[in-house]
Image: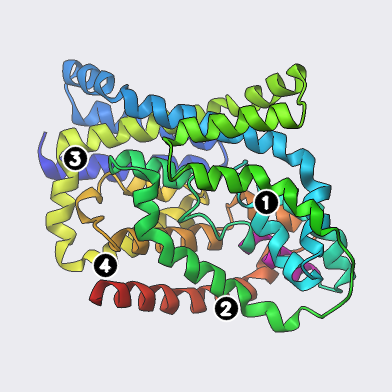
Amino acid sequence: MDAWLNLLAFVASVGLVAGFVLTRRLNVGYSLALGVALYGVLSFSPKDLVDVTLASFDLRMLNVTTTLVLAITLSYLLQRDGSRIYSGMVSLGPRAAAYGIPATIGLLPMPGGAYVSAVIADPLYSRLGLDAKHKVFINYWWRHIWIPIWPLYQGVILAAAILNTTPVNVIRWTWPASVAAILSGLVTLNSVPRVSENGVPRALVSLWPIALVAVLTFVLPLPIAVASVLILYSLVERVGMRELLRAFKHGLNPNILLIIVGSLVFSEYIEATGLNHLLSDILGPYGPVAVFSIPLIIGFATGVEFSFVTLTFPPLLNLLNGYMLALAFAGGHIGVMLSPAHSCFVLSAEHFRCEMRSVYGYLFKAVAVEIPIAAALIYLLMTL
C-alpha cells in the first residue's frame, strides 16, 4: 500500500477513536480496538493482516499485560489505607497535605483515582477554606504529576513496550516533564492559608508498598517487582481470599486489556507499514514541535492519560530520541490536563460541585508555567 495512503488510514483510525471517546459512545478500549482494526484492514492484505497481528502477541505483550493487571490489583487493595494516608500526610503540615494527598494517591494507577483523593482530602480542603474551583484544581492537577515518570503508570509501561526498552530507561529521559508539572502545580500555593492540624507521623508507614515498588523497579523486572509487593502486602495486611479475588477481578478490567492489546498491535501495524519512517521524514525538520504538539492534540482530544502514548508514539517512533521523549510526555500531559473529556476532571468537579469551566483559570496558569520550565530543563540537559 502506498505510504501516503497509510498516512490517510492512520488519520482516519485516530479520528475514529477520538470521535467515539469524545461522544462517549464507546469506552477507550473498544474505541481503540475499532480504530486499530480499521487501520489494519486499510493497510494490509488479509494474509498479511493475520501474520502481522499474530506477530504482535509476544513476550513484550505478556509482560505489559501482567504488569498492568498486577498494578491495578495492588492499587485497588491500597485504597483501604486512605484514612492512614490522610493522617500521615497531615502530620507534615496541612498545606503540604493539601498537595501531598492527591500526589500520593496519584501513585496508584487506578481509573478515576482523582475521585478517591477527592474524598480523602475534602475535609482538609474545607478546613483550609478553599473554594470549589481551588479544591478541584489542586486535587486534579496533583493527582497527575507523576504521569511522565511513575513506573506503574500505563503511559510509562506502554511507552517502554513501544520503544522496546525498560520503564527505567523511559524515566531517565522523561523526568524533566514531571518536574515541570510539579513546579507549575504550585501556582496556587500563596492562596492556601496556614492552619494547624495534628496528624500521626507513624501513619506514613502505610506508604511502604508504594516505596518498595519504586525501589524494586530498579533491580527487578517490573512484573516481578509488582507481584512481589502484592504478595508481601497481602501477607502483612492479612488480605482475605475473597478481597484478593475481588481486587484481581478489578485488575482484569476488559477495557484495560483491550487498551494494552490494541496499543501493541497498533505499534506492530505501524512498524510493518513503515508509517513511522514516513512521518520521520516529513516531520524531521520540525521534530521538537511535532513531538510536543501531536501528543498534546491527541491528549486533549481524547482526555485519556495514556492515549497520547498509544496513538502517537508508534508513528513518531523514529523521532523519540533522548529528551525528545520528555517533550512528548510534557505535551501529552498538558493535553490531557486541559481536556474537558478527562474523567478525573469530571469526577473531581462533580464531587466538589464545581463548574468545570471555572477551573480553567487555574489550569491555564499552571500550563503557562509548565511549558517554559519543561523547555528550559530539556534545553539545558541537551546542551550539557
The part of the chain drawn in magenta is 132-141
**Residue type at tag 4:** Pro
Q: Nearer the viewer, mark 2 or mark 3?
A: 2
Q: In the depicted view, which residue is nearer to us: 194 or 215? A: 215
Q: Is residue 116 left or right of residue 10?
A: right
Q: Please identify the quarter of the rendering in which residue 165 is found.
A: top left
- In this rendered view, identify the residue nearer to me: 168 or 339: 168
Crowd around label 1: few <14 · some 14–19 · many ≥20 (10 Å):
many
- Identify which residue is drawn at 76% across, 60% down: 89
> Mostly what secondary structure, the magenta segment?
helix
User: Which one is in front in this view, the residue at disc 3 or the one at disc 4?
Assistant: 4
Q: Which residue is mark 2?
A: 365
Image quadrant in which you'd find residue 290: bottom left
**Amino acid under disc 2:** Lys
Q: Of the residues tagged 1 and 2, which is closer to the observer?
A: 1
Q: Which comes before the other along the chain, label 4 or label 2?
A: 4
Based on the picture, tell me whether residue 140 belongs to the magenta stretch.
yes
